[in-house]
Image (cartoon, rainbow, N blue to C red):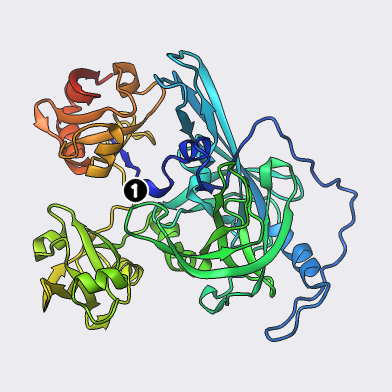
Amino acid sequence: MRVKEIIRSKRFRFLGALASAGLIGVFLGAVGSGELQGAERPPSEKVAPPAPLPAPGIPLGMETFQGIAQRDDAAVVNISTSKVIHEVRTENPFFQFFGPGGAPSVTPWGHQGGETLTQRSLGSGFIVDDKGYILTNRHVVDDADEVTVTLTNGHHYKAKTVGQDTRTDIALLQIEPHEALQPLPFGDSSTTRVGEWVMAIGNPFGLGGNSVTVGVVSFKGRPLDLATRGTPIEMLQTDAAINPGNSGGPLINARGEVVGINTLIMTGGAQQYSGVGFAVPINVAREILPQLRETGHVVRGWLGVQIQDVDEDLAKTLKMKEAHGAIVSDVTAGSPADEAGLKPGDVVVALDGQPMEDGSDLSRHVASKGPDAKVALEILHDGSRKTVRATLGTFPDGTAAVGGASGTDHGYLGIAAQTLTPDLAQSLGIPPDTRGVAVVGVEPGGRADAAGLRERDVIVSVDGQPVTDTASLEAAVDRAHSEELMRLRVRRGNGYIFIVVRAS
């Protein structure tokens, strides 16, 4: 039995609701499609040889970006995905289901479905070596049944997802090409400067064929949560236009090097570009690329706290002379932080003797250490400075799966699930102290689907054994799946029901 644990940032969770309310939101830039078919370059079309790229320190000329577009275009690919949706259920006429790439499909009021629907979306990616590896955003390919990569010459290849990382929203794909590939060189995003010219290449709105936009890096180090709350990525902000379908494409400097992966945009409620886009720095991808190739996921250290920056007002209330460090707003029960004695209100000012300027600083340093690493945290507790020691756990990256006998991608039960947290419980409309595992996806035709398990259900026990997190669900199902029947106690809304799952 395998259950994929999916963790989504509260900040970006309900994009459709934000848009319908006319509020400023963040849109993950892949586009649902299936109707727009892109025009392919005619075989007879002649492509002029690319102009030489400028060396570092050489001023930009009128032909600089023409040369970059001609040189790098062939390395940027179109990614199309499809997913079969069966018996879409909803009791709310305004509910939107966001599938692979964030493509919405609206279900009418009271519809109980029964038919099979195919959900399609489009995004972008870029080739990183001649072996067929391609980087893109995780949200472009997440949960897709089929992924197709199209090169600029019109050649199509089925792609497999080699690895995914929820925290950075990065995915690594691989194709088996029958032709020579042109990879893109990586730059050094740490040396990228505000005001530096950059170009975004991708396939917006599924129009077909790559298009380019040019702008500048407008801010560097913008901390945004892409997945788990409290673990921000310091993003590159740009005014180079990024639209739905550009997700996963490269942000390229004036030397033709990738400095970022275009990931999301701020919107004014219309889910389209409004002048502010964000890219994951390429150094972040470079750091995790070996783990994605070798194991398919990224293992990081985990402390188990929710944190925020200490601003001037907070510093005053804490009697701190300067605003620095990360204040602990919550501690996960049973986490390394809990075992070390950290409490809400503590301020982490140093880790292993290195000063922590803010929450992003602490998150980055903890994530860079492996599980079981021993760290010394210097904290301010009730105005007193002291040192506590913790042994880090494993960061719940959202791609960990619960194994099982069937060997299918969706696991033995055929569900995707997430350990229930107070925030998630609140979003489900149930008491925040509820313990269990929330069902966030059901495989069409799987055991859970046949038994009647639904999204938003909360599994609280298996054959009478309490379930408090995905690990305990794994253990309970492993014990029970050899039996003909498996009894699940499920919280649905304000009540509880029992659901019996058949082994075959």
Q: Quadrant of residue 311?
A: bottom left
Residue drawn at x 47%, y 42% is: 142
Left or right: where does residue 251 sit relative to residue 492? right
All told, the count of numbered labels is 1
Disc 1 marks which amino acid? Gly
Left or right: where does residue 20 sit relative to residue 364? right
Residue drawn at x 67%, y 42% is: 205
Label 1 CA crowd tier, 10 Å (few <14, some 14–19, many 20+): many
Secondary structure type for disc 1: loop
Q: In which quarter of the image is residue 214?
A: bottom right
Q: Position of residue 128 (x, y in %)?
A: 59, 62
Q: Is residue 180 visible?
A: no
Identify which residue, 96 or 481, lies in the foreground.
96
Q: Position of residue 45 (x, y in %)?
A: 89, 51
Identify which residue, 126 or 388, lies in the foreground.
388
Q: In which quarter of the image is the N terminus?
A: top left
Left or right: where does residue 314 sit relative to residue 219? left
Residue drawn at x 29%, y 30% is: 412
Q: According to the image, label 1 marks what residue?
A: 398
Q: Position of residue 266 (x, y in %)?
A: 54, 52
Left or right: where does residue 128 sit relative to residue 280? right
Q: In which quarter of the image is residue 195?
A: bottom right
> Where 475 falls versus 10 (above or below)?
above
